[in-house]
């Protein structure tokens, strides 16, 4: 088994990203879509930290990751507020059935 | 007190009533006592106005007008016009302070009178608020130094008049009357607006002084004297509307639906005088033809209502027609060039006519809102103060010596007489004397029927009582002001006696010499002398300039004619006045003629007068009828000709369309349907991609990214 | 350090780590037994009763009897419950509470992990408790449980903010988040405790005392809320929600919740004590130093640490039987309208004092 | 095989397995709790990479904040009496194919790329101080803008959810 290098972390983050993408693309429930989104953001963050570590420039990557986390918090707060509102109006949160504009 | 403090005082007086109005209208409903605030404010304004009057006349009587301009709108450089700025401004001269005093005094008296008269009204404080806004607008007219501001306040006055006439808007007649007044006024104001626009398009300014200066420099609207005359007449149209002159006089009698103190304030003393005031202001720019027009209008307005007043039975209607008649007098005076007498009559008339109205208000109040004089009679025992005041006013309006009316009226008659002698238009003098006769007759008819004889309605008579002090004191004040002592030391010398005539001088006309009356021209040699001396030395030139200012007003000729006309005119007017009173005495006290039989004998004339010369009916049938007829014709035109053309074109279109339909159906539609089927098939295919779900699109995006990656790497 | 000692003893890092991590458990379980007994006795005496008197002298064996009873009880899982979540929830909750003990220095000789970010770490792992509580509430499939869980989560998340603000205040003042370092720095005597202005010199020390006192009050109140104790016990308000999120639990799982609750009580008390009251430091000198017996000193330190922790646990119980329960809106208002603004202002004041 | 390697594979397994469950399970609640595990694993990764502060922030924000929010969202958008909180998926086949291809491309690019790796990876001593200095010096503007953004997001979320 080789020593754990940069590629190991990157592969894990790529897979995590793909799972997230899969979740975003296939799930019906809006909250599940959000979870997929969080996975994608986490994958991105892993990349940031990894590059920061292996590039020797520790601080900057971590600061970027910090920003991403803050943005993710803001995003999920807004998104969940919207989902709650949608639930109030449509009594469900399935993204494929909320098609009032289409009718 | 200097010029600046005059301006400041004027601003204070102008805006105090507005403050009163704002406060009273906003909070009057919550705080019932707030009407006292309005009354206090008008009292303060009255105080300041008296102070301003005395200071101006005592120390600055010969000074030029005090002026102050405030930049309102700066349009910058406008194409074709150059730099355009619109200024608001205040001008204070002798006329202004006199008018200010009149407005404030009558307004204040009416305020006091109304406290008692309007007691118990459900919109009590609103009434006082309206009085406040009226006073504000009227003062705006008085103070203005330009036409635009005058127009603004002119309309504000119209608005407040509308509000006050329709104050008891639950009554249909009141709301109708307010609408009638408003609309009739608009007709006159339209002319005024046209005149203002003409002036602005020519001179690019609204300020009186600047306009006069430019006219003097020879500039005229459309470069013709005719249009100068037209401008003058158009501006005068505003006065026709506001001063209820023939033919727009019909609104004033109806306006008596408003509360009586309002009639006294607005429809007798101040607002209707605004027309005269406007004419006074624009006097220098009126050409001879315009003045003649004005004189004719004035004469007609003086005569027609006087004949109508003979037969009316409503106490306020009589006074209303009398008002129109007297306003016609003033207008006629201005028309014949008696500038200062016209204005003098405006002031004296304001006092005694306000008094008459307040007196009638007192009578109506005493009779529990009974206005028909046939229900009255013998009231002099019940209402001694009102009666005494009423007699003094009536004497004044009839032009009996020792009253103010005598002074001003005789001045006008003398001027008309002199004017007739100089120009040949003797009709004005004849009309003047005739109207004086009629005035004396109908006024004393009113007195004799109302206050003398036996009570006709015993029940109402028994309940009648003298009005409280708050109502009688204004009557007494106005009665005192109707006596000669305030105006002259010599009650019989009407021509020169008026002290004010040294303060109110006819302004020099600015119209080119060819457009004026000859007698108004300055003497040519004097002008020549001026130009000659101008070339020599400065001090002399100044001297001559001063001299010229003194003599500029009228030619010698006119002065002579006026002087010689005074005594005949005085005698004649006194004669007709006494004749009128005596006739009334014979008719209504001695009853030497059987009135009913007499009326029966002149039935057509009587009815003609009683029905106000059928003006309303005439307007109804002519204007309304004309519009109805026009609409009928248009309707026929529409139904037969327009529709016929439309129908014909329709049938043609139908035939054509039948053909075109066939082509459409088989050839064009075939093509289109084919295309549609093609498009539809594409659509069915493409629709599968367009799911409306973001996630599907995301899949497509990823797919495209992969494709792109494979293409480029 | 005990870890070094263990490493020497066993020669294996894995085994010594394992033993090292179990040590807090050996403290928590007896403590929980004692605390249950204490709670019952305190409540009894506050209400002028005697409390448990049957088992042992003055009922001191009562807790053991309770444990025996709980162990014997049938493990009931309701039919409609989500079994996976239902079973996992108590573990998660206890894991969360227990994880906090990793960063708490019991004495100069023992700390689970000498973390640089110890205080933040404790705040972080507390979130696990929230997740566990929500899990329990949902898994029970009972409206009382769910309501209690949601309330609890909202409460804990809200009150984390003032706690963190006070922690930031401490960072500003001391420049460290390491609890062990924090404790060792407050050495020698009680006037070096942070509540008395810390070990700063000069006027700073006196200027800081009011701010420190405010900070102590804020963090004590908000940690009280975080462990759902009265007057902030809305999540398990008996009169409204039966017993909140652990309504459906019984037997050993219930015992784990119970254990977690008491562990939490001690954890927050220990944190407060460590930050403001010198941690394991004695208020005055050490007997071990005086006698020259070096191994006595860590034991003394542990004694002081446990005493301070148990004192604050006692204060919590005292409050429980003194104050009435808050309404939900009052609870939130307390946090958002009072504690947070006060904490922020306090932070600014401390920062200003430190800059000057 | 060091502890480091073991930890890495442990955390990688946690991350990938739980992430897989997150996106495939039909039960929303299970997905949410699996997400908790994923976050935990990612925090572990951060710790392995020497970013202890980020790891703790990950726990505080993701586990303590976002996950709780998500759970709240789940609990508020599903009726408590309704045990059937399962939810379906659609376009599974095309999505799996395309996402699979994408992940293949991604992994290929990640492994085949020659990353420039700094020779001396410094020991992360006192990262908190480093991050604080960077935040307060180079990135002060972004930091403050983020603060404002967070405030706006909170106000917006509160107002949207209140309606």
Image: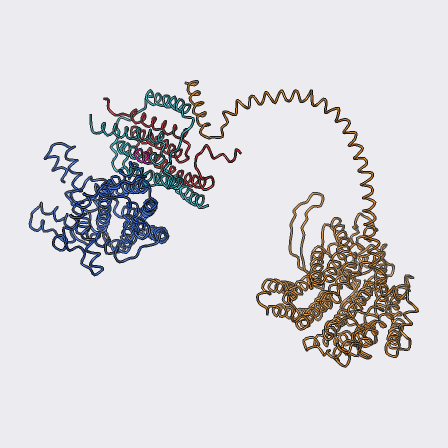
Residue C281 in sight: no
Query: Along the horizontal axis of the image, is D28 left or right of C269?
Result: right
Q: Give the x, y percent position of residue B702.
A: 43, 25
User: Height in image: B288 above or below C73?
Assistant: below
Observer-nearest of B531 and C345: C345
Task: Please tell me whether residue D35 belongs to the stretch shown in magenta.
Answer: yes
Query: Along the horizontal axis of the image, is C206 left or right of C1?
Result: right
Query: Along the horizontal axis of the image, is C260 left or right of B659?
Result: left
Task: Please name the color used to draw chain A.
Answer: red
Q: How many marks?
A: 0
User: Height in image: B690 above or below B495?
Assistant: above
User: Height in image: B514 above or below B40?
Assistant: above
Q: Quadrant of residue A86?
A: top left
Observer-nearest of B107 and B9: B107
Q: Give the x, y percent position of residue C136.
A: 30, 41
Q: Give the x, y percent position of residue B414.
A: 86, 68
Question: What segment carries the magenta color?
Answer: D32-38
Q: Give the x, y percent position of residue A29.
A: 41, 34
Residue C302 in sight: yes
Q: Tell which chain the image draws in orange.
A: B
Task: Please name the color used to draw chain C.
Answer: blue
Q: Tell which chain the image draws in cyan.
A: D
Task: Please tell me whether residue C37 belongs to the stretch shown in magenta.
Answer: no
Q: Quadrant of residue D94?
A: top left
Quarter that holds the N terminus of chain B: bottom right
């Amino acid at each position: 088994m080789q020593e754990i290098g940069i590629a190991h972390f990157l592969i894990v983050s790529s897979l995590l990203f793909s799972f997230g993408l899969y979740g975003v693309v296939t799930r019906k429930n809006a909250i599940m879509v959000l979870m997929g989104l969080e996975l994608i953001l986490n994958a991105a963050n892993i990349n940031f930290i990894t590059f920061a570590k292996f590039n020797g420039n520790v601080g900057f990557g971590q600061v970027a990751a910090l920003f991403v986390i803050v943005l993710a918090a803001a995003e999920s707060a807004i998104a969940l507020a919207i989902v709650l509102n949608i639930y109030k109006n449509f009594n469900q949160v399935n993204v494929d059935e909320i098609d009032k504009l289409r009718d | 007190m200097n010029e600046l403090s005059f301006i400041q005082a004027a601003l204070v007086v102008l805006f105090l009533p507005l403050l009163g109005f704002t406060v009273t209208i906003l909070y009057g409903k919550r705080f019932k006592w707030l009407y006292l605030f309005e009354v206090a404010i008008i009292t303060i304004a009255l105080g300041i106005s008296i102070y301003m009057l005395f200071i101006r006349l005592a120390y600055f009587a010969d000074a030029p007008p005090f002026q102050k301009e405030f930049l309102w709108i700066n349009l910058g450089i406008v194409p074709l016009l150059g730099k355009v700025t619109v200024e608001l401004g205040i001008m204070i001269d002798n006329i202004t302070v006199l008018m200010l005093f009149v407005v404030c005094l009558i307004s204040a008296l009416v305020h006091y009178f109304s406290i008692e008269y309007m007691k118990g009204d459900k919109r009590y404080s609103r009434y006082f608020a309206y009085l406040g806004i009226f006073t504000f607008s009227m003062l705006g007219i008085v103070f203005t130094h330009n036409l635009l501001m005058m127009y603004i306040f002119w309309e504000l006055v119209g608005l407040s008049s509308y509000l006050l006439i329709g104050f008891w808007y639950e009554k249909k007649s009141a709301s109708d009357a307010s609408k009638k007044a408003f609309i009739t006024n608009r007709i006159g104001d339209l002319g005024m607006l046209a005149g203002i626009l003409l002036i602005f398009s020519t001179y690019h300014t609204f300020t009186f002084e600047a306009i006069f200066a430019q006219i003097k420099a020879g500039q005229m609207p459309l470069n013709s004297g005719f249009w100068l005359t037209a401008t003058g007449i158009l501006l005068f149209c505003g006065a026709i509307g506001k001063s209820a002159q023939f033919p727009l006089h019909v609104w004033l009698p109806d306006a008596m639906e408003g509360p009586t103190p309002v009639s006294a304030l607005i429809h007798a003393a101040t607002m209707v005088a605004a027309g005269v005031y406007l004419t006074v202001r624009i006097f220098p720019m009126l050409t001879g033809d315009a003045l003649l027009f004005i004189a004719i209008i004035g004469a007609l307005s003086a005569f027609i209502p006087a004949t109508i007043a003979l037969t009316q039975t409503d106490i306020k209607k009589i006074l209303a027609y009398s008002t129109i008649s007297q306003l016609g007098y003033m207008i006629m005076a201005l028309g014949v060039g008696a500038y200062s007498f016209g204005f003098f009559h405006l002031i004296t008339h304001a006092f005694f006519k306000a008094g008459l109205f307040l007196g009638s208000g007192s009578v109506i109040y005493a009779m529990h809102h009974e206005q028909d004089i046939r229900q009255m009679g013998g009231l002099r025992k019940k209402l001694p103060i009102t009666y005494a005041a009423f007699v003094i006013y009536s004497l004044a309006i009839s032009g009996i010596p020792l009253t103010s009316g005598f002074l001003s009226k005789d001045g006008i008659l003398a001027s008309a007489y002199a004017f007739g002698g100089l120009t040949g238009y003797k009709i004005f003098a004849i009309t003047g004397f005739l109207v004086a006769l009629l005035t004396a007759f109908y006024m004393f008819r009113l007195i004799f029927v109302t206050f003398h004889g036996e009570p006709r309605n015993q029940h109402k008579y028994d309940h009648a009582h003298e009005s409280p002090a708050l109502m009688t004191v204004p009557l007494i004040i106005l009665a005192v002001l109707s006596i000669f002592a305030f105006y002259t030391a010599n009650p019989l010398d009407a021509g020169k006696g008026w002290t004010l005539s040294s303060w109110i001088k006819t302004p020099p006309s600015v119209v080119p010499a060819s457009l004026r009356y000859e007698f108004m021209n300055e003497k040519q040699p004097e002008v020549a002398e001026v130009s000659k001396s101008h070339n020599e030395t400065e001090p002399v030139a100044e001297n001559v300039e001063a001299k010229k200012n003194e003599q500029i007003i009228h030619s010698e000729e006119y002065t002579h004619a006026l002087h010689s006309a005074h005594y005949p005119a005085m005698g004649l007017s006194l004669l007709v006045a006494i004749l009128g009173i005596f006739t009334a005495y014979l008719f209504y006290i001695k009853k030497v003629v059987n009135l009913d039989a007499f009326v029966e004998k002149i039935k057509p004339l009587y009815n003609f007068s009683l029905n106000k010369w059928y003006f309303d009916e005439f307007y109804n049938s002519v204007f309304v009828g004309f519009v109805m007829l026009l609409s009928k014709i248009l309707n026929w035109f529409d139904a037969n000709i327009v529709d016929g053309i439309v129908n014909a074109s329709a049938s043609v279109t139908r035939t054509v369309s039948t053909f075109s339909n066939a082509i459409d159906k088989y050839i064009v539609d075939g093509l289109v349907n084919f295309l549609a089927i093609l498009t539809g098939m594409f659509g069915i295919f493409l629709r599968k991609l367009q799911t409306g779900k973001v996630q599907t699109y995301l899949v497509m995006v990823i797919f495209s990214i992969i494709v792109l990656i494979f293409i480029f790497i | 350090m005990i870890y070094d000692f263990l490493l020497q003893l066993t020669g294996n890092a894995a085994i010594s780590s394992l033993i090292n991590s179990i040590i807090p458990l050996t403290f928590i379980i007896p403590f929980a037994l004692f605390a249950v007994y204490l709670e019952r006795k305190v409540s009894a005496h506050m209400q002028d009763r005697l409390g448990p008197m049957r088992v042992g002298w003055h009922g001191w064996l009562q807790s053991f009897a309770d444990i025996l009873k709980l162990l014997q009880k049938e493990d009931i899982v309701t039919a409609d419950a989500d079994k996976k979540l239902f079973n996992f929830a108590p573990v998660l909750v206890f894991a969360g509470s227990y994880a906090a003990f990793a960063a708490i220095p019991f004495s100069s000789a023992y700390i689970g992990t000498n973390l640089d970010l110890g205080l933040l770490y404790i705040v972080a792992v507390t979130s696990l408790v929230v997740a566990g509580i929500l899990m329990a509430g949902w898994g029970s499939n009972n409206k009382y449980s769910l309501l209690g869980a949601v309330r609890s989560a909202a409460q804990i998340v809200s009150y984390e903010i003032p706690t963190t603000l006070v922690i930031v205040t401490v960072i500003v003042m001391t420049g460290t988040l390491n609890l062990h370092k924090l404790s060792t720095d407050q050495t020698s005597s009680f006037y070096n405790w942070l509540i008395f202005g810390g070990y700063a010199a000069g006027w700073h020390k006196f200027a800081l005392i009011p701010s420190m006192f405010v900070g102590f009050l804020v963090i004590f109140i908000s940690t009280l809320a975080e462990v759902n104790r009265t007057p902030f016990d809305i999540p398990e308000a008996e009169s409204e929600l039966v017993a909140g999120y652990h309504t459906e639990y019984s037997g050993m799982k219930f015992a784990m919740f119970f254990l977690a609750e008491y562990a939490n009580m001690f954890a927050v008390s220990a944190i407060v004590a460590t930050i403001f009251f010198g941690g394991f430091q004695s208020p005055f000198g050490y007997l071990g130093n005086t006698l020259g017996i070096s191994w006595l000193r860590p034991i003394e330190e542990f004694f002081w640490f446990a005493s301070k922790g148990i004192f604050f646990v006692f204060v919590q119980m005292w409050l429980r039987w003194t104050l009435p329960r808050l309404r939900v809106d009052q609870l939130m208002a307390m946090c958002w309208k009072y504690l947070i603004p006060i904490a922020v202002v306090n932070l600014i004041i401390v920062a200003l004092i430190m800059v000057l | 095989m060091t502890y480091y390697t073991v930890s890495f594979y442990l955390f990688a397994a946690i991350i990938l397995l739980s992430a897989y469950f997150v996106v495939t399970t039909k039960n929303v609640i299970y997905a949410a709790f699996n997400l908790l595990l994923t976050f935990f694993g990612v925090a572990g990764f951060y710790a392995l990479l020497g970013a202890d502060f980020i790891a703790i922030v990950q726990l505080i924000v993701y586990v303590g904040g976002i996950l709780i929010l998500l759970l709240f969202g789940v609990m508020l958008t599903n009726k408590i009496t309704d045990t059937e909180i399962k939810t379906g998926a659609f376009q599974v086949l095309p999505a799996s194919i395309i996402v699979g291809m994408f992940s293949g491309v991604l992994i290929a690019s990640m492994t085949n790329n020659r990353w420039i790796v700094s020779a001396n990876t410094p020991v992360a001593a006192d990262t908190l101080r480093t991050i604080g200095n960077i935040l307060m010096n180079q990135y002060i503007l972004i930091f403050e803008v983020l603060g404002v953004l967070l405030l706006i997001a909170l106000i917006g979320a509160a107002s949207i959810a209140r309606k």
